[in-house]
Amino acid sequence: MTALSISEPGRDCPLCPRLHEFIAEWRQREPSWFNAPVPTFLPPDGDDAVRLLIVGLAPGLRGANRTGRPFTGDYAGDLLYSTLISHGFARGEFKARPDDGLELVGTAITNAVRCVPPENKPVGAEIATCRTFLVPTIARFPNLRAVLALGSIAHQSTVRALGGRVAAYPFKHGGQLPAGGITLFSSYHCSRYNTNTGVLTEAMFVSVFSQIAAFLQE
Ligand code: SF4
């Protein structure tokens, strides 16, 4: 079995019954939506080009679950992709559609939980189960140097996927720690809730990407 085949779940992955049922319900309600585990978004030049992996929490119901591309179709993508473009991690124009032609540069984007969870809240067992795919996703990129986890849940699942103990790697916005042979960066999630409440400002988000860009130039 190749790394690719185990890092990407099948469209009908049954491992989390609650999420499987939730998606089945939305396939009935919105048959034109993607409504399946959202695959990792890759750069056109392949796995060898990836030096930065971004790990989000889970697809948004009307965002990635609708469009099939991570962070595409809801607010979180607007801030993420504009920041990626301004730092050279993506090129083109982000139009919130998977056919907008936007390309990642040396970067891949995935989620700790590949299926949309009700209320945007996966339970612990679902986060642990979907690590079945996060672990090989991290391992598939031979030149990976940095992982950016968005939010504490993605951070904790990434620490575990790298073989670390969560207590030894506490979540901190702007955190930068060596872990499992790469460097783990962390940021508050770029959700509308976090930006509306001031937990995360655009300047705070941009500064994390400046930190990563500087690190990758070392
Ligand atoms: S969240 Fe992950 S492990 Fe669970 S059903 Fe979806 S793809 Fe499978």
Image: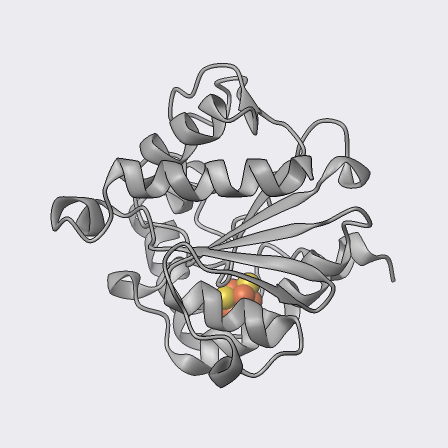
Q: Quadrant of residue 134?
A: bottom right
The residue that appears at 56% across and 83% down in the rendered structure is 165
> Looking at the figure, which quarter contains the C terminus?
top right
The residue nearer to you, when weighing 13 against 90, is 90
Image position, residue 119 (x, y; %): 24, 63
Is residue 14 among the parts visible in the rendering?
Answer: no
> Looking at the figure, which quarter contains the N terminus?
bottom right
Q: How is the image coloured?
A: one colour
Q: Quadrant of residue 89?
A: top right
* Left or right relative to 26: residue 36: right
From what the image shows, is residue 32 above or below residue 61? above
From what the image shows, is residue 73 above or below residue 176? above
Q: Please identify the residue farthest to the right as the structure is shown.
A: 1
Please state the total of marks drawn on the protein image. 0
* Left or right relative to 44: residue 107: left
Image position, residue 110 (x, y; %): 55, 50
The residue that appears at 48% across and 63% down in the rendered structure is 113
The residue nearer to you, when weighing 171 against 75, is 171
Q: Please identify the residue farthest to the front as the structure is shown.
A: 218
The residue that appears at 37% across and 70% down in the rendered structure is 122
The residue that appears at 50% across and 81% down in the rendered structure is 166
Image position, residue 107 (x, y; %): 62, 37
* Left or right relative to 184: residue 194: left
From what the image shows, is residue 193 above or below residue 180? above
Is residue 100 among the parts visible in the rendering?
Answer: yes
Image position, residue 197 (x, y; %): 12, 51
